[in-house]
Image (tube, coloured by chain):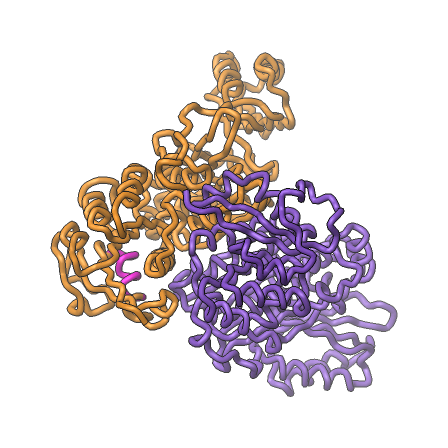
Chain colours: A orange, B purple
Amino acid sequence: MSEPYKIGIAGLGTVGASTLQLLVNENARISARAGRPLKVTGINARDRAKDRGVDLAAFEWFDDPVALAKSNGIDMFIEMIGGSEGVAKASVEAALASGKAVVTANKALVAHHGAALSKLAEETKGASLHFEPAVAGGIPAIKALREGMAGNGVTRVSGILNGTCNYILTEMETTGAAFAGVLADAQALGYAETDPTADVGGFDAAHKLAIMAAIAFGQQINFDAVQIDGIENVSAEDIEAAADMGYRIRLLGVAERTDAGVSQRVRPCLTPTNSPLGKITGVTNAVLIEGDAIGAAMLTGPGAGGYATASAVLADVVDAARGNCPPTFGLPVGDLATASTDPAADEGAFYMRVSLKDQPGTLAAVAAALGKEGISIHRMRQHDHTGDMAPVTIVTHSTTLAAVDRAKANIASLDVSLAPPVSMRIVGV
Amino acid sequence: MSEPYKIGIAGLGTVGASTLQLLVNENARISARAGRPLKVTGINARDRAKDRGVDLAAFEWFDDPVALAKSNGIDMFIEMIGGSEGVAKASVEAALASGKAVVTANKALVAHHGAALSKLAEETKGASLHFEPAVAGGIPAIKALREGMAGNGVTRVSGILNGTCNYILTEMETTGAAFAGVLADAQALGYAETDPTADVGGFDAAHKLAIMAAIAFGQQINFDAVQIDGIENVSAEDIEAAADMGYRIRLLGVAERTDAGVSQRVRPCLTPTNSPLGKITGVTNAVLIEGDAIGAAMLTGPGAGGYATASAVLADVVDAARGNCPPTFGLPVGDLATASTDPAADEGAFYMRVSLKDQPGTLAAVAAALGKEGISIHRMRQHDHTGDMAPVTIVTHSTTLAAVDRAKANIASLDVSLAPPVSMRIVGV
């Protein structure tokens, strides 16, 4: 076997500690797969005293992750610090600038600075940037997209990219409970953070989608181009109405090639209960790749968790140790297309729910408002009255978001409208 | 860009022609992913005149695939001839021996001769062997297992590896029809071959399972160690009885690490309707990978079809053109463990169906036969009588195949037994 491949790990939280444990406890097996001895030499974390299940005395301790990143004692720098700025960014830059391979699970860092970091990796001899653990936890989504689908013109990449949201939506579905209560339970169980914004606001999923879109469509990563809507306003009523019609509500990340360019959207959508993404329940993540050769393939698995995410870290470690370092986003940075920023028309079927006074003529007024925008109705259902309110759910034929938004504004202005109309895109019909 | 990567394709059937079309029509896009111009230079097929959707005049024609394999005009040889022996084997050997990269979709060839071929690839400068298209069509199962799961100690790899069988079983399920009629329909629709043995007999799935088991468990490929049972004897009665209890019957390939070594089995199993593999319907393939770090991840997609399988061919082409050639089975041939040949105990729950005379005491006799072998009953259901026959279905608690087989023999010898008892393993409970 060749020279040891020397590894520094910065950040020993759940994923960092799990990675360290596997590299120590399963060293012979993983080294065999890497074709050379893997050796953790340096570590960094905030708290030196905390038990990580491994004796830390065997490694050189660094108080400063940037010093570890620059150290001559490592070939690879594993960044598990987190956050798109600060020492995470500084240490990854330092590692790349000094010609090291970098593995990061930091989706915010890659989503915001992936272009500059991959350029730095390309321009620096010996440097390479790997981020399999940043997208969909243990699922080898990056490898599947960048290498497994290399022969495809990808038309769409979509997925359930945030386990916390999918857990909350699944719980709402099975219990009928409202968002706030389910979120509180998820926080108590440790499935949601104390500040849940990154998850339930859709930002975490958007980071992952931006990374996958760049690879899938060979374009510069552009997080700002992702249109983001979270699950905070998904109501128990909408989940029930969707179920009545054979749909589930899922926070979907969808990046697709349209006539206007590539659109990137994270938002709650209705998807058929028996569709590939509709079948995904609980904390599981799923990535659906559609291309002109493959048709469609899907990967499902754990989107979070220490050992599961460490599995993705180690895939990158083995790749880098073997010298399998294709361009970060599948193409050299200079060959990546400019990312589309114009929102596409967003054409498709939509779900709408309107809350109307229960009196003659109201349905006709709604139908007229839809007709005025050229929206044709596929299904319409009036539900049990609540007091003098008659909720009506509508599934449209293919139309545009703009038309739906105008129709909603018109309906909201009707005398008989009791609450702002709700709408969601239907995906996967 | 660097020098063109010159490709020869032998065999222009559905997959070969689809590969050729994509390499010609999407050349710029795929070459960009490969980092160098991909150029088909030589071709071989049985029939020179047939229309393949591409003008063949641009390529050097070879009547003999071995001559193409040896030709100095190619860097890579794509073998799409088929069959484990004859010119397919001879041409792959010739290509490897002359230092070329080889991509093959030939699962029989790899299952039977993968050990020798990968050794030849290792010993010959410049040679490498790639077979993503040989397993599960377009699904990047080999890449996921060999690279994406490189950090895992794999405990089990299982899957629905034959779309024809899954189509037939799904059709039997939804129509209630018997095997023979559904097979005839599938043949008429082109979903099953005129000689369906390779598919319905389980051999095709077994080829794929043997390849995945070698990679998953770092052992020499050993097709002879796979225990194979096809779907020919799956009855409409068993499918209905399974459905009554919340199961589907699926032809599962399962390779798992047990105390006795690695067991490899292809056979019809019962799996819960809402389990990952139980949800797979129709011609779709699925590969479920379980490991000590990842937990479980699943890949689903098209297991056959010209363009879908060409997608996998092109993934290998891009890998090889980039020089990403890890050891064929994940480890150097010399480091692969000897494959287990002792069948493991096959412990788990089993489904049994016994056909008994409808008279007092028969159930007690069956219960006694099971009790004698230490088989404990989880569920037992007596179905509607047919004439004087009372079918009884049983789900056991965990036991062994040997105990079940002995109990079946005892039950068959009872006076009240009207037909040989049936049993199937339950997987994924």
Q: Position of residue B6 (x, y in %)?
A: 52, 50
> Which residue in the rendered view is the most extreme toward the right?
B387
Q: Nearer the viewer, residue B41 or A263?
A: B41
Residue at 50% across, 32% down: A257
Question: In the picture provided, is A93 more to the left or to the right than A230?
Answer: left
Residue A53's place in the image compared with B172, above or below, is below
Query: Is residue A18 found inside the magenta-colored segment of the image?
Result: yes
Q: Position of residue A256 (x, y in %)?
A: 50, 34
On the image, which quarter does residue B334 sit in? bottom left
What span is colored magenta in the figure? A13-22
Q: Nearer the viewer, residue B331 or A78?
A: B331
Query: Is residue B193 found inside the magenta-colored segment of the image?
Result: no
Quarter of the image with the C terminus of chain B is bottom right
Quarter of the image with the N terminus of chain B is top left
The prevailing secondary structure element of the residues shown in magenta is helix
Q: Nearer the viewer, residue B394 or B348?
A: B348
> Which residue in the rendered view is the most extreme toward the front?
B72
Question: In the picture provided, is B367 more to the left or to the right than A422?
Answer: right
Residue A236's place in the image compared with B297, above or below, is above
Residue A311's place in the image compared with B259, above or below, is above
On the image, which quarter does residue A307 sit in? bottom left
Q: Position of residue A268 (x, y in %)?
A: 46, 35
Q: Is residue B22 visible?
A: yes
Residue at 77% across, 71% down: B391
Q: Is residue A201 visible?
A: no
Question: How many marks can you see?
Answer: 0
Residue at 66% across, 55% down: B62
Q: Position of residue A269 (x, y in %)?
A: 50, 35
